[in-house]
Image (cartoon, rainbow, N blue to C red):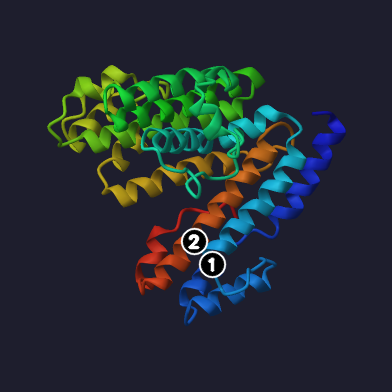
Amino acid sequence: MTDDAYAFATARVRYREASLLDRPFLDGMINAPGVDEALQSLAARGWELPEGGDWRAALKKRTADVWDEIRELAGDQRLLDFMTAKNDAYNVKAALKAIVSSTSPEGLLVTPAGLDPASLPELLAKKEYSKLPEIFADAAKEAYGLLTDAFDPQKADAVLDKAALRRQLEIAWELKDGFLEDLAVTDARLTDLRVAKRFAGTKRSGEALTDFVTGEGGISSADLAAASGSDEELSARLAELGFDAESEAVKNDDVKFEKYCDDALIAIVRRNIYEAMGARIVVGYWLAARTEIRAVGIVLQCKELGMDDQAAERIRDLYV
């Protein structure tokens, strides 16, 4: 990206940041009498609402609109690939499972995606793995074998989840961008901890855990496996390794820990708020907007279910 392109992207993002929702606005949505009134408050802030009051469609439209702008601003396909790596992995998983079960993946694939959702199922059905980025090609081939030979969908999912995290790291290293590397390493570490926390207290061996984690987040697979017996063991090991915040976080229940993980990533964006150069401008805005959209979804779902009292504690930290 040229200096002029950086300047343009920075100006556009700074302008858009001013329209991001803040916590007082979300609190107002929570306190609205119903879903319709909450949606009207979004409309007043410029959100486009589909006919019929379908709030899920509104979130999809908002996501698509933000992504269209991100595509204009990115200037480097690798940035887009960084941001879509997890969706790509999810789509490969969904398409492979549809192939194995002889069903259609229609309605299962998500966007935005770097791997074209329209052509991905046929490509995988023909086993044309070489047309995928190498890290996904190897993972898709292995996952297919796990589904058809080992009948192990959980391990197949893990193979593709790890591929997505490693794809993010690969791109960060290619671009030599410290911000992206910080995001990717942190994401890998937190994802590994999610897995270790799920293993804690189960009868599965620590050795089995190594098939499900990357070991790329500053905590080795061996360390995670050795401490997978309980949340207390995991917390103690993290403290020994100097990951004090994570050590405290894993003691919480799954809902609070998931919130901690999401908040940790947006905190990286906040630390780079005044950096006006490089990939962090575009990627940071995407993460901020995505967090906002998910927060709105949490509020609206809680309102729909009559759980307004639980919305506030489930909302992730916002960029603004």
Give the residue type at disc 1.
Answer: Trp
Quarter of the figure that contains the C terminus: bottom right
Quarter of the figure that contains the N terminus: top right
102 left or right, relative to 28: left
Q: Nearer the viewer, residue 94 or 252?
A: 94
Of labels 1 and 2, earlier in sequence is 1
Badge 2: few (under 14), some or many (20 or more) residues near its Cα, within 10 Å?
A: some
Does any portion of residue 212 appear in the rendered image? no
Q: Residue at x 66, y 31 (%)?
A: 79
Query: Against 65, is 86 above or below?
Result: above
Give the residue type at disc 2.
Answer: Gly
Residue at the limit of the structure toward the right, as seen here: 4
Cα separation between marks 1 and 2: 8 Å
Quarter of the view holding residue 284: top right
Q: Residue at x 63, y 57 (%)?
A: 62
Does any portion of residue 21 appear in the rendered image? yes
Element class at badge 1: helix
Q: Residue at x 60, y 21 (%)?
A: 131
Q: How many marks?
A: 2
Q: Nearer the viewer, residue 206 or 236?
A: 206
Element class at badge 2: helix
Residue 246 screen position, x and y as percent: 34, 36
Q: Which mark is residue 55?
A: 1
Q: Which mark is residue 297?
A: 2
Q: Residue at x 58, y 41 (%)?
A: 269
Residue 5 screen position, x and y as percent: 83, 35
Residue 150 screen position, x and y as percent: 26, 23
| Circles 1 and 2 in contact, beta carbons < 8 Å | yes
Quarter of the view holding residue 80: top right
Q: Which mark is residue 47?
A: none
Residue 260 screen position, x and y as percent: 39, 46
Q: Nearer the viewer, residue 202 or 159?
A: 159
